[in-house]
Image (cartoon, grey):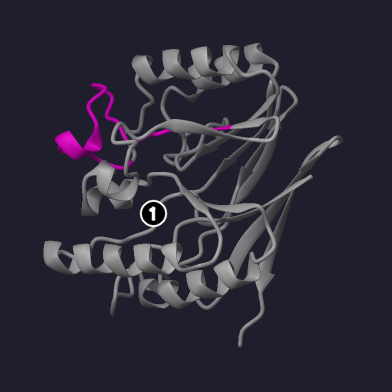
Amino acid sequence: MMRIGLFTDAHFAEGLTANKTRMCWKSLDKVKRLLAAFAGMDFAVQLGDLINACGDPDKDMENIRKMQHVLAEGGIECFGVLGNHDVESARKAVFLPGHARGYYHFDRENVRFIVLDGNFTSEMISYEDAEWDWTDSYIPNEQLAWLADTLAQTEGKAVILCHQNLDARANDPHVVKNSEEARRILEESGKVIAVIQGHCHSGCFQVINSIPYYTLKALCEGEAIPYAEAVIDGNGIRVVEKELTKE
């Protein structure tokens, strides 16, 4: 059995409150508390938008260093997913050392965890190399081919991790524009037991052609400290959304 701690959309920036509800300055402490709560789990995953750009590149880098220090000292291995606000602050390699292209996979026991990157424009240019709008989100053909090949080589089951959303919600800008193509690959593999994503701060849940799509609530909103725990065993996967109580 595996137990995994999950959180998303910390949007950390020292001294910043954004869009009136995003208390970005509180997120560093929230992440510290979550990592402590994840003690005893097998690993953790943060699903993107770890950082919120503040308009000052030097301050952005300092905020990144502070958050990375918290993650490194949290006492649990934490895998990362790229969000659109992350690539607004720095190059992808800053957040994912060794995975500069933004997508990768890792294996635990008999489960393959596949991390996707939806930070590409309709012209299939990476956000870090283009002028971009967060509603213009695609997964390029090269990455889709890699996804299909990675699933084909997967011997057990697979869990998909992505910041942008891969489910089907009409006219919702949080959904990747070519999500239907991605879903077809997931469905045809017969190996995907869940898709776990962030980006849409209110959260969401759907089942599409037997695959559950879990969209977690954002950590940065207000005083709340939402997270999820995934349990994977012989019966499949269970993702339970939870919330830490205030101190």
| 195, 175: nearer the viewer | 195
On screen, residue 36 versus residue 83, left or right, reads: right
Residue at the extreme bottom: 247
Q: Looking at the image, which residue is at 33% across and 60% down? A: 51
Judged from the image, the secondary structure of the residue bearing numbered disc 1 is: loop
Q: Looking at the image, which residue is at 65% across and 66% down? A: 39
Callout count: 1
Q: Residue 186 at x, y = what percent?
A: 60, 20
Residue at the extreme right: 235
Q: Is residue 132 magenta?
A: yes
* Amino acid found under the numbered disc labelled 1: Asp
Residue 56 visible in the snapshot: no
On screen, residue 172 versus residue 231, left or right, reads: left
- Within 10 Å of disc 1 (Cα), the crowding (few <14, some 14-19, many 20+) is many
Q: Looking at the image, which residue is at 50% across and 31% down? A: 105
What residue is disc 1 on?
49
Q: Is residue 133 magenta?
A: yes
Provide the major secondary structure of the magenta segment.
loop
- The stretch of residues the image draws in magenta is 113-134
On screen, residue 146 above or below 101: above
